[in-house]
Image (tube, rainbow, N blue to C red):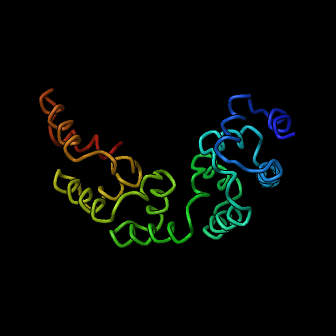
Amino acid sequence: MINSFLKNIGYNENQINMILNKTNLVENTIIEKIQFFQQYGFTNNEIIKMSIEYPTIFIYSKDNYLEKIKYLQEEGYSLEKIKQTTINTPALFSWSMNTILNKEKELIELGFSKKQSRTIIKKYKEIFGLKKDNIEKKLSFLKEIGLTSEDTYKVISQNPMILGISNKIIKEKIDNFISLGIEYNNIIQMIKRN
């Protein structure tokens, strides 16, 4: 029954096997979870995209899903924006609210605005694996290479993946640009734009 249900909404055989192997859930549970997302306006293709990117999405309870959706609604997200956020970051459903709120608080303590903190959390799920002092070191490094404090927060919130790039690699890239004859100030301007 579950195989034909999943095929009917668009899963292929390999995707079905992956979902069933990763979740170990009874058929009705997966069907209920898919129906839950459908009730919130997710298309079959969007559900497939989320579950392929994050196959264990179906192991969480509907209460868990509702808790995250309610949190985002309280933060002013429209239903369409909630859909886009969860489609792009389905692992959101695996994070506890305490984890999300603690990371947000930590980023605010480091000087990010509430909006910037939330943007970083949405864009860069690896943020939950980064310690506060590592983020602080990245902030210091970016200021040392010539970014203003304001630019540093802006650069990280616009492109939080920079937090996962070692300072050594960033420095090497700067040195490479300098060896190509690009002026240091122009390199800093490129960092600020990206």
Q: Quadrant of residue 157?
A: bottom left
Residue 93 falls left or right of residue 115: right
Nearer the observer, 122 or 29: 29
Tell me where residue 71 appears, x and y as whole percent: 63, 68
Picture quarter with the N terminus: top right
Q: Residue at x 64, y 64 (%)?
A: 68
State whether residue 92 is above or below residue 159: below
Tell me where residue 65 appears, x and y as whole percent: 69, 61
Nearer the observer, 52 or 153: 52
Nearer the observer, 35 or 83: 35
State whether residue 99 is above or below residue 1: below
State whether residue 191 is above or below residue 17: below
Tell me where residue 58 appears, x and y as whole percent: 70, 51
Nearer the observer, 63 or 17: 17
Q: Residue at x 18, y 52 (%)?
A: 146
Q: From this viewpoint, which residue is outermost toward the right?
A: 1
Picture quarter with the C terminus: top left
Residue 86 falls left or right of residue 134: right
Q: Residue at x 65, y 51 (%)?
A: 57
